[in-house]
Image (spheres, helix red, strand yellow):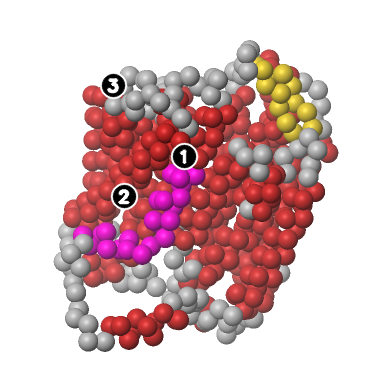
Amino acid sequence: MKILSIELQKTKRRGIWLVLAALYAVMMAWTAYSYTGSGRQHIQYGWMDTLYTTPLLNAIMIPTAIAVFASRIIDMEHKGNMWKLLETVQSKRTLYFAKILYGAIGVFLFSAAEFAGLLCMGFFFGFSGAPDLWAYGLLFVQTFVISFNLFLLQMIISLLFSNQAVAICVGLCGSMAGLFLMYLPQWPLLRCMLPWGHYGATMFVGMDWNAETKRIVGFYYMWQDNGAVIFIACWFLLLIFGGWFLFKNMDTDGYHFQKMFRAKEKAAAINKPVKIPHMPIELMKTKRTPIWLAFLILPLISSFIGTANYLNNIEILQSTWHSLWTQHSLFFCYLFMPPLIGVYASYLWRLEHNGTNWNMILTHTSAYRIVFDKIAVCSVVSLFTMLWLGFLFIVCGLIAGITAPIPIALADWIVCGFIGSVSVCAIQSFLSLWIRSFAVPIGIALVGGIAGLVATAKGILYALPYSLLSIGLRANNPNRELDYNAFLTSSVILILLFYLLSVAYIKCRDVKTQG
């Protein structure tokens, strides 16, 4: 308990618990919004409907939020020589298991709050009948155990890699993988093998849907495969003892994966002339970084999900290319592209926030140039992401057997989506400048994507940068008429606003160094 109290003191005023609080608020707001004005049908099946949809929300949102939560618990130990200092005052065993206990408490409180919130929401909306407390208790236990396994995985990654971009990228890819595996009930082994698929593998409520009337016929309890429980238990043991083995053998200065290659690199560098790279400075900072992992994988998983959903509902989705584009871009632009841009922006500002780099950078570069370069490079990487998504869209459409010509409007979707993404780059760049934490701005981006969805549904399309991204891509409806004047005006205003706010922040604050 003493070591746990020390961990609590370390995270005092760091906003770590706000990560789980924000996740809880977003999930409850999403659930409440889905029932607002939904009619008698959802009231009738409300208790079972909640048991059906909650695992899907968990699979989409919890992996990224848990990655941010675990990163915030671990990242301070990577600064300076903190690992070396901690070993002089406590054993590695107590340190390791104190981190685990801290995370277990956080995950338990979130799971309990979700359990209570779902019940309260059901009574508030007047769901018919009484809730099945046994089923809701089972949902609570599953949410806690699966989320705790994900915390252990993310904690280990954050321990091993001082660069927290690796852990955040894994969390983002995990969220997309969880969504992807939800659409693959025909591959139960794959859902059981991957920890992000356990939310779907342990679902015990199914839904009867009438495609002709587009109405819910009812819900039913499903038989659960005990194989999922075995895989969950195996993952728990592997992560607990495997993580302890890795942490026990970790150097006091952190884990070094490159030692085996250093001798070869030094030998190859002998008598080799020094070459000054001709790359833009900010782009050089992203060289050999893990953000490219998320750049490649997230659109790829989104395309797989969209194509699978299109093929499974091809009798309903009659607009071929337009329907396929909606399936490809809808989840990506709301739930995954904003955090991905958040990763880009946080990584670009990461070096300035370390050590005394602010002292050095401001001696030869103006604030205007620094901010412009950050937003420009982030925007270029976002453009590559859009082009990669468009390329995957065409390839998947051809594989799906679409014979109609590729729509010329695809270029307009990508260009307008890119313009909308620049405004997201501007706000995330400001947040990453203002908030020194690597993970917190990414969590805000995840919430911002949900806010963009709500803003689009409410008709205030041009109010937020995140909604500009979605309407630029035409994610909701490729046939939607876009008011180009309002779209471009709003984009330019938001880009200039956050650009000038960033410049003013640098100019009006003293340079602060961080050890």
- Name the residue at 26% across, 52% down: 377
- Mark 3 surroundings: few (<14), some (14-19) or many (≥20) residues within 10 A: few
Mark 2: which amino acid? Val
- Residue 109 in view here: no
**Quarter of the image holding residue 293?**
bottom left
* Predominant SS along the magenta part: helix
Element class at badge 3: loop
Element class at badge 2: helix
In the rendered view, tell whether residue 509 sits above or below residue 427.
below
In this figure, which residue is indicated by the disc labeled 1?
303
Label drawn at residue 381: 2
Which of marks 2 and 3 precedes in the sequence? 2
- Mark 2 surroundings: few (<14), some (14-19) or many (≥20) residues within 10 A: some
First to last magenta residue range:
280-302
Task: Report x, y in % for residue 230.
Answer: 77, 55
Which of marks 1 and 2 precedes in the sequence? 1
In this figure, which residue is indicated by the disc labeled 3?
483
- Residue 292 covered by magenta stretch: yes
Task: Report x, y in % for residue 241.
Answer: 69, 70
Looking at the image, residue 202 sits to the left or right of residue 74; the answer is right
Mark 3: which amino acid? Asp
Q: Quadrant of the N terminus?
A: bottom right
Which of marks 1 and 3 precedes in the sequence? 1
Element class at badge 1: helix
